[in-house]
Image (tube, helix red, strand yellow):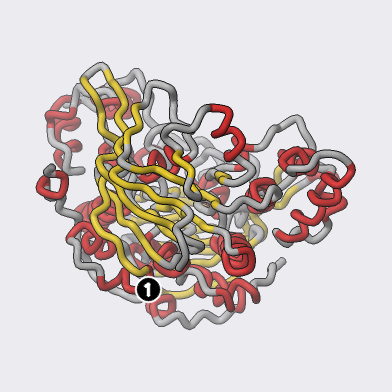
Amino acid sequence: MSKPLLEVEDLRVTFPTPTGPFRAVRGVSFSLGRERLGIVGESGSGKSVTGRSVLSLLPPHARVEAKRLSFDGKDLLTASPGEMRALRGSRISLVMQDPKYSLNPVMRVGEQIAEAVRDKGAGARRRAMEMLEAVRIRDPERVFNLYPHEVSGGMGQRIMIAMMLAPEPDLLIADEPTSALDVTVQMQVLAILDDLVAKRGMGLIFISHDLDLVASFCDRVLVMYGGRVMEERHARDLRQATHPYTQGLLDSLPRIDDDRAELPTLKRDPAWLKD
Amino acid sequence: MIQVRNLNVTFGQGAQAVRAVRDVNFSVAEGESFGLVGESGSGKSTALRVLAGLNPHWTGEAAVAGVSVGQRDARLPRLVQMVFQDPYASLHPRHTVDRALSEPLEIQGIGDVGPRVERALTDVGLGPAFRFRYPNQLSGGQRQRVAIARALMLEPKVLLLDEPTSALDVSVQAEILNLLRRLRRAHNLTMLLVSHNLAVIAHMCDRLAVMNRGAIVEEMDVATLRRQEPREAYTRQLLLASRGYDREVAANIITYD
């Protein structure tokens, strides 16, 4: 692997609260090449905050510190708002969970995709059409003219992905991109992301609470808890995880082919969060 | 205990009519746990809401313990209760746990409120200390325990569960599933569980029906599900897609009408 696309070293994010500072991310380090990196964890583990701090999309009162936070050699910590705007969308994109809240309800979906294309003008419409085809929407001419409320959840998510991919980003951060979708639609959306990583050499950060999905889809996985990385593994070895937190999560999942009467519940150890 | 015959639910009229539930038949014996599984729009929740009396527009037969759910029969609240998907939405934010749990008792004119509330809280693993808290002082799992306690206040025979753990983290899901299994044994409850998650259904149910586009595709016992030997192609595809990402499977997904 050549030089990593994204390098994160000792990332710390703190939110001030009335009861004192809340440390949402406490010293996370990882690097990403042209690969699929999964970040899994339960709610409050800091996985989404980690994804958002790469894009400087946290509220202004959040304090973001890191020894290193660089994208393609560029330091993101010292980048000006203008420089961040130039990166955001065009080189680093973010796909969020719910298309209902992320698409503009009063704008045709095709126009929203065209707006994301880098070179505006006559080519943008054609490019939007190509993107709709790339995410396997069968009748792009028709879908181009629809409003968000006229499309299903699965199609809405594909439209979001089309929009985020229109400027051909080098890095896509997908925060629970398929959690609201049915399993069969989820599979089709993942196949699109899979192709983009394989064919275009895009880097992908896939944030999810679904361990089995991440294990089957990603190359590497970071398991987060309480703002820290508990362990990092090759995705295909996730079932052999050694950390008690990862093991506990995997054990607590019901499975189709098992007949355990009682599911083991997770015992959290305060030592996992000791400094 | 639960009888559903030729159930049909249609939303809208004329050309825009959507047949959300089509000719659905199933029955659940006393003490049995039955699952309805399917993707979004399959009609599983709509069928459940008919039994809860939350959907008045239906035709056919639907009865709990021989009492039709069509007439607002005064016996129904003590026969059947429901637990909803989102514990953040199903508890009143300005009502204490105590108020949420005593309300059904007061409506039904049952006395002995205090001790009953405390017993119910202990029953769901929370304990009396939680009695005067507000929902915003509780975690998602604790809220769902309160919602379950509320559903059990009138000691119903049937518990309807609509995706009771899909809004929860997996470790909390395990706790709630364990609790539901324990309560089912302790109170000899009949359960009807709606879920999109085949593993949750396999863990909780004795039998299940797979739904697609409003109709039941097939009915099977849990052993058949565990062996992953369904009869219908639709169910096979659902099982394959539930196993995690597979490029091959993704390429061959088809839409069943």
Q: Quadrant of the N terminus of chain A?
A: bottom left
Q: Residue at x 39, y 43 (%)?
A: A69
Mark 1 neighbour density, 10 Å: few (under 14) some (14–19) many (20 or more): some
Q: Is residue B1 left or right of residue A92?
A: left
Q: Is residue B155 left or right of residue A157?
A: left
Locate residue B135, reporting x and y percent. Answer: 30, 27
The answer to whether any part of residue A76 appears in the image is: yes
Q: Give B254 or B219, whichever is nearer the viewer.
A: B254
Chain to which mark 1 belongs: A
Q: Quadrant of the C terminus of chain A?
A: top left
A28 shown above or below A261: above
> Element under label 1?
helix
Q: Is residue B185 left or right of residue A195?
A: left
Q: Which residue is mark 1?
A: A236
Q: Give A41 or A153, whichever is nearer the viewer.
A: A41
Please tell me how many numbered marks the rendered image carries.
1
Residue A270: which quarter of the image? Answer: top left
Q: Residue at x 49, y 60 (%)?
A: B36
Q: Residue at x 32, y 48 (%)?
A: A42
B30 shown above or below A168: below
Say which amino acid is labelled 1.
Answer: Arg
Q: Give B196 or A41, whichever is nearer the viewer.
A: A41
Locate residue A139, reporting x and y percent. Answer: 83, 57
A115 shown above or below B195: above
Residue A184: which quarter of the image? Answer: bottom right
Q: Is residue B205 left or right of residue A20?
A: right
Locate residue B107, reporting x and y percent. Answer: 34, 24
Q: Residue at x 47, y 75 (%)?
A: B220
The answer to whether any part of residue B109 appears in the image is: no
